[in-house]
Image (cartoon, rainbow, N blue to C red):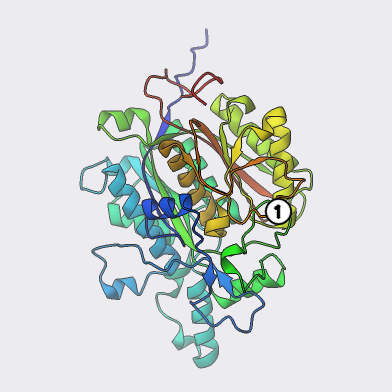
């Protein structure tokens, strides 16, 4: 007789931190988001006058990271520094920042980045062209490799468990969270810091995306440039930042008396297998991804109370995702509120999935859904319940967070308010659960 498999471990969120164009921490970011503020401004990190795009979402207030000497700080690329800031906040929020807070052999990091230390690469390449190989910094390689954010976080907290970096374009942060969920469920770790970081506001990256005609050119109205699901959307607005979540098995969190802020219920991933940059017009890859995530959570479309979509403000991407959501939700497509937060933050590339998962969890926790900014003329083909123009009070318990990337890579997270009365397994089932 074959023994029944052990109950699947539940995975909860005990800490969250982020650094975004709206603020250097989660609460500043979330309050600005609910109040309808935009983090998009004219670029200040370099002179963009020669480019057709001169706006971006820059982090203008550095995250507070104590105990790093200035000499060492100069040897950390900006993307890794932002990641470190988000992780420090998340670990403090989780109550795990002190020695002995968790078994270091059972705690790990998965900090994603689509591009990594691109500023270090370009700066050192230019120095080499001007003065030869001797002008390359001896720290250039360890500064620029994408997994350095994970490495620095592990060093900071002495974590000797899994140490990973996922680089799947704009789905990177969501994949890092989803794969950490799998590690925790499998018993490979008890605690994971998961998220994503990006610092792409340099002329090479902005210019490259501009040449693809992927970016908004509303230079004279930066705060109104990112327009998810609007009929007049003309491209995304690039942004920088980082997001980090502390994920734990429920048993580990309860054993140490942790405050539980939410739960990761499910994870799905798929590929469009269609085009290097454009999504399938019918949204089939995104739809498959969302269905897989819900199945992994033991839930169905009728259990979804809220969606934080990928919704970058590109003509093709928003339409494909809207079609996928309409197919998934069916008659409920006008009942499930959708908050496209990139209207306020811009697109954080490899950090987007992490930051948006955090914002979705914080929305469920707070009982308030953020507005979709700049939705002046809703695209009639994007027939969804778009939260606008103000934040909306909610009793939502289950949210989808979508992240889709170049190469046709897709990731969906199913996130939930924590229910400490639920039996082991998915914490929320059925429409009578308060949604």
| Residue 251 horizontal side relative to residue 356, left or right | left
Quickly name the residue at label 1.
Answer: 377
Q: How many marks?
A: 1
Task: Identify the residue at image location x=58%, y=77%.
Answer: 203
> In front here: 214 or 116?
214
Q: Position of residue 30 (x, y in %)?
A: 43, 50
Q: Is residue 278 visible?
A: no
Task: Identify the residue at image location x=41%, y=51%.
Answer: 31
Q: Position of residue 44 (x, y in %)?
A: 49, 77
* 203 in relation to 106, above or below: below
Residue sitting farthest toward the bottom? 131
Task: Identify the residue at image location x=50%, y=32%.
Answer: 396
Residue sitting farthest toward the left? 99
> In front here: 430 or 31?
31
| Residue 279 horizontal side relative to residue 118, left or right | right
* 285 in relation to 72, above or below: above
Which image quarter: residue 303?
Answer: top right
Which image quarter: residue 189?
Answer: top left
The crowding category of the residue bearing disc 1, from other C-alpha atoms within 10 Å (few below 14, some 14 to 19, many at least 20), is: few
> In front here: 262 or 248?
262
| Residue 22 horizontal side relative to residue 304, left or right | left
Q: Position of residue 241 (x, y in %)?
A: 46, 61
């Amino acid at each position: 007789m074959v023994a029944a498999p052990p109950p699947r471990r539940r995975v909860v969120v005990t800490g969250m931190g982020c650094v975004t164009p709206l603020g250097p921490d989660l609460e500043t970011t979330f309050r600005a988001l609910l109040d309808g503020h935009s983090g998009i401004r004219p670029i200040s990190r370099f002179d963009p006058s020669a480019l057709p795009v001169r706006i971006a979402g820059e982090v203008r207030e550095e995250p507070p990271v104590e105990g790093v000497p200035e000499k060492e700080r100069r040897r950390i690329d900006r993307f890794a520094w932002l990641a470190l800031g988000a992780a420090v906040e998340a670990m403090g929020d989780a109550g795990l920042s002190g020695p002995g807070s968790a078994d270091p052999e059972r705690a790990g990091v998965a900090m994603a980045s689509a591009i990594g230390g691109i500023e270090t690469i370009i700066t050192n390449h230019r120095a080499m062209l001007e003065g030869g190989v001797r002008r390359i910094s001896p720290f250039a390689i360890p500064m620029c490799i994408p997994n350095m954010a994970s490495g620095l976080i592990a060093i900071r907290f002495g974590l000797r468990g899994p140490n990973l970096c996922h680089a799947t374009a704009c789905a990177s942060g969501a994949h890092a969270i989803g794969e950490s969920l799998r590690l925790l469920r499998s018993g490979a770790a008890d605690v994971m810091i998961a998220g994503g970081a990006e610092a792409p506001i340099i002329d090479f990256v902005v210019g490259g995306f501009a040449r693809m005609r992927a970016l908004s050119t509303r230079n004279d109205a930066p705060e109104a440039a990112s327009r998810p699901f609007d009929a007049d959307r003309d491209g995304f607005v690039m942004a920088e930042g980082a997001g980090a979540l502390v994920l734990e098995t429920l048993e580990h969190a309860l054993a140490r008396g942790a405050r539980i802020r939410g739960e990761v219920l499910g994870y799905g991933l798929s590929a469009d297998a269609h085009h290097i940059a454009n999504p399938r017009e019918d949204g089939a890859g995104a739809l498959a991804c969302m269905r897989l995530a819900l199945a992994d959570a033991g839930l169905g479309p009728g259990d979804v109370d809220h969606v934080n979509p990928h919704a970058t403000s590109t003509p093709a991407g928003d339409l494909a995702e809207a079609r996928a959501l309409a197919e998934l939700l069916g008659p409920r497509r006008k009942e499930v509120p959708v908050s496209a937060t990139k209207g306020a933050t811009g697109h954080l590339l490899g950090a987007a999935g992490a930051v948006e998962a955090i914002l979705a969890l914080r929305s469920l926790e707070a009982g308030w859904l953020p507005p979709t900014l700049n939705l002046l003329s809703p695209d009639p083909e994007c027939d969804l319940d778009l939260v606008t123009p103000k934040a909306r009070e909610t009793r939502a318990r289950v949210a989808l967070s979508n992240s889709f990337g170049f190469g046709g890579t897709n990731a969906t997270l199913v996130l939930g308010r924590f229910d400490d009365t639920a039996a082991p397994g998915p914490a929320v089932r059925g429409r009578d659960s308060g949604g």
